[in-house]
């Protein structure tokens, strides 16, 4: 095994891959560390502390001269690259305490199915829609991108259509199968999400993936695309369906709320909120998720702006495949997959979950 002063970033990433880690952390003044099953620990091996020169070599080696120049100007950089046809890496490079550092997210090349990911079967039905908006929500690192990749791959295998993705950066790579796939990366293939979204409607798409809803302009174009015969997938950093709708509505001026609620009620198809929860046996994490399907009842609540009533509709919507976050956690506890203590730590409403567990 080489010393840290001789090792390449690819060496470290491959060891992290063998550890089944989700992230590799590099900074001067620390040993290389990984996130493994939600916990941060040292990278396997006797590596020693990274000095400033080694940190610069490891970090700068990931960038082209143009990217390096931009990094020196903006002091941060997002990018993606592959390692030996085994993994793709989404990297965020930054400065801390005056020295360079990086966090490298490991993304498997293989795209798993909804069943392999252990997600509710109703998610497969979302791929059958021909138009509308489907949102995936949750904090960073909760598996939204992995779930979206599974859905896009399902469409890619089963429909003869044009899929366009707009991402920052591209994570999962989709090759053409039954569908024709165009993947556009912000800052490489387009200047920003809004410009790409405005252009995408002229690119004859059937299915559109927008990596993230960051501003009202992007949201407005995504809604328009969903209303005019396209199936649109995107993400929002919110913990639940009701808070997602609150966030969207609050992006816009108050006088537009009623019209926006009406548009959402007609175009929204589902909101899926995810959390990755540590397993009781320590062998990884499972995805707990709240599932809101836009039934006529749910759509009417959205049209009327009654977002506070959505939780009850979700909890009573088993027939449609709906479930609350607490109901998802309860299933895992009953199956012995997670502990009660962990379930309560990740609960949507802690008092409600305590009552469900006592029953």
Image (tube, rainbow, N blue to C red):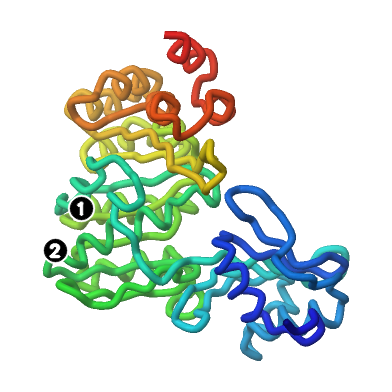
Callout 1 environment at 10 Å: few (<14), some (14 to 19), or many (20+)?
Answer: many
Left or right: residue 201 compared with residue 63 = left
Disc tally is: 2
Nearer to us in this view, 68 or 173: 173
Determine the residue located farthest toward the bottom in the rendered image.
65
Report the residue at 25% width, 66% height from top.
Answer: 201
Residue 326 lies, in percent from the top left, at 43, 24
Residue at figure coordinates x 26%, y 45% from the top left: 123
Q: Quadrant of the N terminus?
A: bottom right
Residue 10 drawn above or below residue 315: below
Judge the density around disc 2: few (<14), some (14-19), many (≥20) Cα neighbours within 10 Å: some
Q: Label 2: which residue?
A: 158
Q: Position of residue 160 (x, y in %)?
A: 11, 69
**Residue 67 falls in which quadrant of the image?**
bottom right
Disc with the residue nearer the chain's start (2 vs 1): 1
Residue 127 is marked as 1
Place residue 218 in its image quadrant. Answer: bottom left
Q: Is label 2 in a helix, a strand or a loop?
A: helix
x%, y% of residue 36?
A: 61, 55
Q: Secondary structure at mark 1?
A: loop
| Residue 252 seen anywhere in this rendered image of the structure | no
Q: Nearer the viewer, residue 254 or 128?
A: 128
Q: CB atoms at circles 2 and 1 under 8 Å apart?
A: yes
State the image quarter where residue 100 is shown.
Answer: bottom right
Q: Which mark is residue 319?
A: none
Viewer-closest of 161 and 90: 90
Asked if 170 appears above or below 20 in the picture, the reply is below
Of the pair 181 and 39, the residue shown nearer to us: 39
Say which residue appears at 69% left-offset and 53% top-offset.
40
């Amino acid at each position: 095994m080489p010393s840290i002063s001789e090792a390449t970033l690819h060496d470290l990433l491959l060891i992290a891959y063998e550890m089944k880690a989700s992230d590799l952390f590099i900074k001067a003044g620390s040993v290389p560390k990984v996130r493994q099953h939600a916990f941060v620990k040292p990278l396997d091996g006797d590596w020693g502390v990274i000095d400033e020169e080694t940190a610069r070599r490891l970090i700068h080696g990931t960038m082209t001269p143009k990217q390096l120049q931009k990094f020196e100007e903006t002091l941060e950089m997002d990018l993606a690259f592959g390692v030996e046809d085994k993994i793709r890496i989404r990297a965020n490079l930054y400065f801390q305490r005056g020295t360079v550092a990086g966090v490298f997210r490991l993304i498997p090349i293989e795209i798993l199915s909804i069943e392999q990911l252990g997600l509710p079967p109703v998610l497969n039905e979302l791929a059958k829609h021909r138009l509308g908006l489907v949102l995936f929500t949750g904090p960073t690192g909760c598996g939204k991108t992995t779930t979206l990749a599974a859905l896009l791959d399902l469409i890619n295998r089963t429909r003869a259509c044009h899929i366009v993705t707009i991402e920052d950066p591209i994570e999962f790579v989709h090759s053409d199968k039954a569908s024709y796939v165009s993947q556009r990366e912000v800052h490489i293939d387009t200047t920003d999400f809004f410009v790409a979204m405005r252009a995408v409607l002229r690119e004859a798409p059937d299915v559109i993936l927008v990596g993230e809803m960051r501003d009202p302009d992007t949201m407005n174009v995504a809604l328009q695309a969903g209303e005019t015969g396209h199936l649109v997938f995107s993400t929002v950093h919110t913990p639940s369906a009701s808070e997602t709708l609150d966030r969207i509505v609050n992006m816009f001026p108050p006088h537009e709320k009623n019209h926006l609620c009406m548009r959402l009620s007609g175009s929204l198809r589902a909101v899926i909120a995810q959390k990755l929860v540590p397993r009781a046996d320590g062998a990884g994490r499972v995805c707990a998720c709240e599932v809101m399907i836009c039934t006529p009842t749910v759509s009417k609540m959205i049209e009327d702006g009654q977002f506070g009533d959505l939780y009850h509709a979700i909890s009573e919507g088993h027939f449609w495949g709906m479930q609350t976050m607490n109901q998802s956690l309860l299933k895992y506890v009953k199956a012995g997959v997670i502990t009660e203590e962990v379930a309560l730590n990740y609960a949507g409403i802690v008092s409600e979950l305590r009552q469900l567990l006592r029953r």
